[in-house]
Image: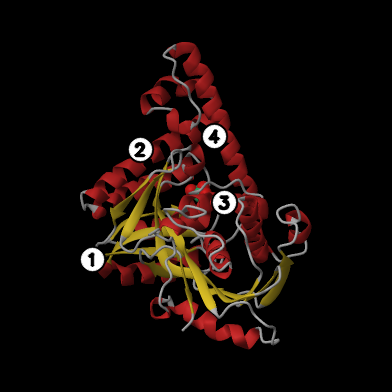
Amino acid sequence: MSTHFGTMTASVNMPEPARDALNIFPIVINDGIQYASTLGAAWASGRVNLIGEHTDYNDGYVLPIAIDRVVVFAGQARSDGIVRLWSTHFQAFAQFSLEGLPETFEQQSHILPAWARYILGVIAELTRAGAVLRGFDAVVHGDVPVGGGMSSSAAIEVATAQACMLFSNGRFTIGTEGTTLTPLEVAALCQRAEHIASGVRSGILDQAASCLGRPGQAILLDCRSLEYRYLPFDAPGLSLLVIDTGVRRELANSAYNERRRQCEEAAQMFHDIIVQQDQAGHTIHALRDVTREQFARYGSQLPDLLRRRAGYVIAEDARVLSAAKLLEEGLIEQVGPLLWQSHAGLRDEYEVSSVELDTLVEIAWQVPGVLGARMMGGGFGGCTINLVHNEAIEALSQAVDREYPARTGLQASIDICRAGSGPGNAWSG
Ligand code: GLA
């Protein structure tokens, strides 16, 4: 028997937001059409990234954790090729057609609200991959903070794939054996959807984390080979706090693509230098291939800016592997110092932090019992991740309430996250 990714769960095991969404569906979409299925729900988690920032698109390593927050689709299959959606967060409808996809993506996405473009993007990519789909009506709901740095977009993308599988009624399947698509094929396809929907050339971190999540586990992912390993992340005395700066910057998208170009340029320069001087037949495809010794030896031949960008990425990859080793040995507390170091690199060498992110990390630094903190995600806004002794949560939260508004004029919000499950789906009742 094949192992299905996102196993059919008895509705008893549904995440809370899925049950809520099933109740909302008949209230908001009730025009009495004849559906082709009963009511069902499909969901996927957001993520946090313990360490390994801006390493994914350099073919490096990441160490994310899927969280216990989900985006949910609840609805019914239609007998035609129309998809109608109601977003509880945006309080808005969106509608598009499966007709002519993926070719009609541009034309249709043009008139959709931004949140629905990600959904259309995934459906276009599923169609490109040969999945046979059916239209559906659904409520899109969830408890991943939208734009809060926990990858609500990856959660919506992976949940879209789950919803399409559910409503296709077995015409296509996602799983590890004998299925149409594997979880990592879904992640890659959702990553492409993110590219076409947002114009950001993001890596695979967010979508892979959402696809592979397991309670109590972090995921060590090699972003080149896509091999992954689960590592225990289960320390009852410790918590992961996500603190949102409350700031989103438009600049983030263009700066992200710019960093990616700089890394590609730096990798190309290392390639040229090393092939010329080293003669060892060593090929550099990405910064992942530059060893720390090579960086120390040849780094000074790069322009200062590119040298700093590359230096950060090479050191961050090494930190991910150190953190993975510590988790394996059950030494979670010792991951803390690596988080501070990661933040310093992101701030000073990679230059993707912001005054607000630095302020939150400085506040956390002063609170005894905070083991480590750093900015998380693309940067320029969004949130920090904090590894904290349970007894220090209150002190950290008070320090943030007291100092953050005084220093920035803004309010921060704090969330405690736990390692959650991968995607799922179920028929109601
Ligand atoms: C965003 C992208 C990811 C990754 C991070 C930085 O979250 O979507 O692919 O590059 O930034 O680590």
Question: On the rendered image, what quadrant is the N terminus found in?
Answer: bottom left
Q: State the colouring used for the structure image.
A: secondary structure
* Mark 3 vs mark 2: in front: 3
Q: Identify the mark at residue 189; answer none if there is no mark.
A: 3
Q: Identify the mark at residue 318; answer none if there is no mark.
A: 2
Decide which of tag 1 and tag 2 comes sooner along the chain: 1
Question: Decide: marks 3, 4 in contact (CB < 8 A)?
Answer: no
191 and 234: which is toward the camera: 191
* Mark 3 vs mark 4: in front: 3
Looking at the picture, how far across and down is residue 383, in whole percent? 48, 60
Q: Identify the mark at residue 263; answer none if there is no mark.
A: 4
For marks 4 and 1, give the CA distance: 38 Å
Hey, what amino acid is under mark 1? Gly
Hey, what amino acid is under mark 4? Cys
Q: Identify the mark at residue 358; answer none if there is no mark.
A: none
Question: Decide: marks 4, 1 in contact (CB < 8 A)?
Answer: no
Q: Is residue 304 above or below residue 16?
A: above
Residue designated by label 1: 237
Looking at the picture, how far across and down is residue 152, in whole percent? 53, 63
Decide which of tag 4 and tag 1 comes sooner along the chain: 1
In the image, taking residue 382 as reference, residue 82 lies left or right, namely right
